[in-house]
Image: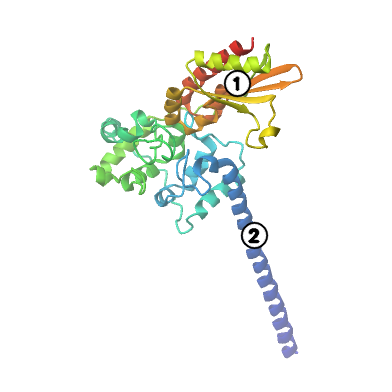
Amino acid sequence: MKTRFNWIFYRLSFLLGSVLLLTAGDVMAATDNSEQASLAKGSELFQTKCSVCHGSEGSGGVGMPLNLDDFLKTTSDKYLQQTIRLGRPGRVMPSFSELSDVQVQSLIKYIRSWKPEIKPPVYDQTHIAGDKEQGKQIFNAICINCHREEGIGGKGTGVTFSRPRDAEIIAPAIGNPAFLASASDQMIKKIIMTGRESTPMMAATSMGLTEKDVDNVVTYLRSLSKELPEHGHEHKPDAAVLTYESSYSLEETIDNIKAAAIGYNFRYIREQTLNRGFVEKDQENKNQYLVYFCNFNFLNQALSVDPRIGMFLPFRATIMKKGDTVMVMTVNPNYLCSLFNNAELREGCEFMSEKYEAMLEESTL
């Protein structure tokens, strides 16, 4: 009887162990699948939301490079999460408040997957209480050279890739309210203490700073905190495209636009059919034209602030004839400027919108 009981107990134990092994295997497989799915979703989100500025592999462009070792070593997941959520009001980085928590975490996992050997740092929330005035003096003597007054950030965006700038990588806006809301005191201190290799940011000791000096700088930066704006972007103008109906023929409208643009200090570049290069020359649509002009002085100034200004410069007017109606259209710089989230562009975009509207009105009425 005892032998039979032992045999039954052995079989039950074996079966139970098999079930547990199979269950554990299923759980591990499900976990692996879940991780892969999350990573795939993060990759998809990054390519659609982030790559246009940060590059398809995070090497930078209009936006800052994200795949640098020292960036990943000193940047916490909490900072990345907050940055994605808040953006950088007044700078190029928009807020992605529409993303769910799961989507944000997928994005962060994907960013971390570039350098899986680098573990994300976790900072305590200990507040640094240094001397604000001493920190301000140090900042104005050293840091202001790159980060500019009150940490508003270097001119331009991201990585130098088309126009000469003071440094290969533009200094971030460390006085920006969203940066200060995202980065803890300890994280800011760590970055200043260690610097960031492959960027102009040197370690504190290379700049002759002590740990106490760094504490003072962090305290000064924290004093620059301002209330975050309610929305990441300003209100968008209603019209993305400026559209006018012309009182003239297609040929007369084109001539009028050329004369008006030159009168507003634009240099005529060329005119062409809208589908030139996409079809054989004898198949081009003679009822659809593009006319190009440019104010090169303004273009150079604008590109130094934000290379994406090339989306609406040089000036391009589209003239289309359908039946007896001739329409003239061009992009509305004010609308695009609101999408860029770059306060430095506001004045220039308003100037361009006024010019565009004046030229189109003069050409069509």
**What mark, if any, has residue 237 been given in the picture?**
1
- Mark 2 crowdedness (10 Å alpha carbons): few <14, some 14-19, many ≥20: few
Q: Nearer the viewer, residue 74 or 361?
A: 361
Quarter of the image for the C terminus: give it: top right
Residue 279: x %, y % from top left: 67, 37
Q: Which residue is mark 2?
A: 33
Residue at image point 70% right, 18% down: 326
Residue 364: x %, y % from top left: 64, 12
Residue at image point 71% right, 21% down: 321
The amino acid marked with disc number 2 is: Asn
- Quarter where residue 51 is shown: top right
* Disc 2 to disc 1, C-alpha distance: 44 Å
316 vs 212: above or below: above
The amino acid marked with disc number 1 is: Pro
Quarter of the image for the N terminus: give it: bottom right
**What mark, if any, has residue 212 been given in the picture?**
none
Residue 351: x %, y % from top left: 49, 17
- Mark 1 crowdedness (10 Å alpha carbons): few <14, some 14-19, many ≥20: some
Which color mode does the image show? rainbow
Q: Secondary structure at mark 2?
A: helix
- Image position of 327 (left or right of 169): right
